[in-house]
Image: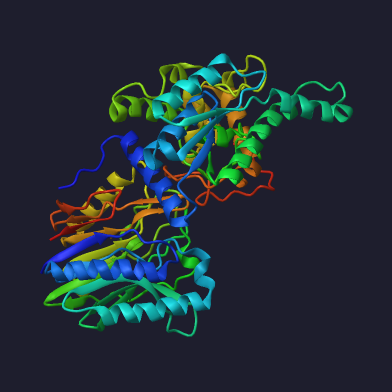
Amino acid sequence: MQSFPESKEERIFKAIKLGLLDYVEKTGIGNKVVLGLSGGIDSALVAALAVETLGAENVKAITMPSAFSSEGSVSDSEILSQNLGIELYNIPIKEIYDQFDQSLNPLFDDLPFDTAEENLQSRIRGTLLMAYSNKFGNFLLATGNKSEYAVGYATLYGDMNGAIAIIGDLYKTEVFDLANWMNQFHYKKEVIPESIIQKAPSAELRPDQKDSDSLPEYELLDQILFCYLEEQLSAKEIAKKTGEPKAVNNVVSLVDRNEFKRFQAPPILKLSAKSFGSGRRWPIVQKWTGIEF
Amino acid sequence: MRIRLEQLNPIIGDINGNKEVILSSLRKAEKDGIELLVLPELGLTGYPVQDLLEKEFFRYYCYKINDEIVKETGKTALLFGSITPNKKSTGRKMNNSALLARDGKLLFVTHKTLLPTYDVFDDLRYFEPNREFDYFELDGIKLGVTICEDIWYNENELQYHVYDVDPAKEMKKSGAELIVNISASPFTKTKHENREYLLSSHAKRLNLPVLYCNQVGAHTDLVFEGDSMVFSAEGELVANTKPFEASFTDL
């Protein structure tokens, strides 16, 4: 008798590999990919999964530090690339960013630094990755996870660029679980550096930014998202379950407001009973919101 | 009867390529002395076919290849999934069908009854539902052939609809002695347990063996892990395939 993988992580690992391999083989898109490495867990996991599926020689990575990138952003990406045996290119974006800033200055004048400048960094990276993709034929892998697609913490035409989002149906907590599982049971050594797994999640788009500045901690965020998206509970019911009515209202309202982004996301490999994509049809132009119930 | 369930990995729309995959699987089964080869739902077209099915020339090409596959059969009976034209003057253009052929002849055709439209599915957009539940007797064994959702009768997620007909039960009533289900059922983290539970409880409830053959491979956002299984009338797992790859199991 054949055994079916017991652990959720092993199942997901095998499903993602099959999903990516058949995407490549059946479309004939070619087996070379490129992705941006931020020094964070999402891009590290996508790089590791791509290497497992397509081989190290077919995976290229680019790190694109800005003025707000932490030191670890580059150095952790270097360690990861070394461990995976992939080539890593470094294209600093500070000068490109300053050029944009200067060109926009007559319009923006002395308006404060906000989402426009944050997203600009992500879009510069997205543009560089697509340029590499066009020049060398490596198709771009999107690195977003389900938690960030849910609350809209991803940049359209920036880090949402890509042909397919292979971890886009994994909550952030599941991203950590899979990275830990790969180190422990697949590699049986530290291939995805602990320094990447341990650091506090951050978009690094403004000084000393942390995801937890504006979002609940991921344990709570993912619990709220699971209740809202998969169990189809109302905000009231989720507040009762979690005891966090403020966080629930905040998260639910973010989910409701961000369908316009998800509609433009790359195809997301479905791993759960309710994933963003072909199995969830939601109007973009609509007024209903879950926080009223 | 020697039966093989083989989970194939077709490519959507690669009709010639899929035909070759089906025929090479048939050649191997013939060589191995298999009497009945069971292949997954819509193995000729791949699943989900989506709006390729709106094109008349696509449909007619599939019908032509169905005939060619039937003509290629020899002493091994072949049960494969494809589309067939809806012969009624009303309704949708085609059926999602299981075709049984042997010795170059089409022996039996049945169609999918329960056509899901929830989650990622959109079967009722294209296919005319079946409402006939005849078994087919092959070498003295009365086969009740069902397709995918037909066996998920009221076992889908709670928020979705409730079906008014249980195809496997209707087959049993009409005299079937064995339920065969050909599927294209996508992966989720928890689907394996759901699948095991539902196949086992169906087998026990009907007191009939259940043979389940599922597509393997991935198409765009959907992954199909195969996980084809056979349950005895007592609800015990008696055979299965290697998941996440093209593989087969013999009975």
Q: How many marks?
A: 0
Q: Position of residue A212 (x, y in %)?
A: 57, 19
Q: Is residue A94 left or right of residue B193?
A: right
Q: Is residue A47 above or below residue B109?
A: above
- Image quarter for residue B63? bottom left
| Image quadrant where one finds the C terminus of chain A | top right
Which is nearer the eye, A218 or B130?
A: A218
Is B234 left or right of A141, judged from the image as shown? left
- Say which of B214 and B27 sits in front: B27
Residue A78 visible at all: yes
Q: Quadrant of residue B204?
A: bottom left
Instruction: Give x and y (percent) for residue B115.
Output: 42, 64
Residue drawn at the location 15% of the way across and 66% of the way down:
B3
User: Could you say where residue B246 lies in the image, as x and y percent from the top left?
Assistant: 28, 55
Q: Is residue B179 left or right of residue A256?
A: left
Q: How is the structure coloured here?
A: rainbow
Q: Nearer the viewer, residue A245 or B143?
A: B143
Instruction: Tell me if I can see residue A265 in this picture.
Output: no
Percent x, y of residue A256: 62, 39
Question: Which image quarter: residue B128?
Answer: bottom left
In this image, A201 relative to A105: left or right? Answer: left
Q: Name the residue: 52% across, 38% down.
A: A34
Q: Residue at x 41, y 72 (%)?
A: B129
Vertical comparison of A76 with B175: above or below: above
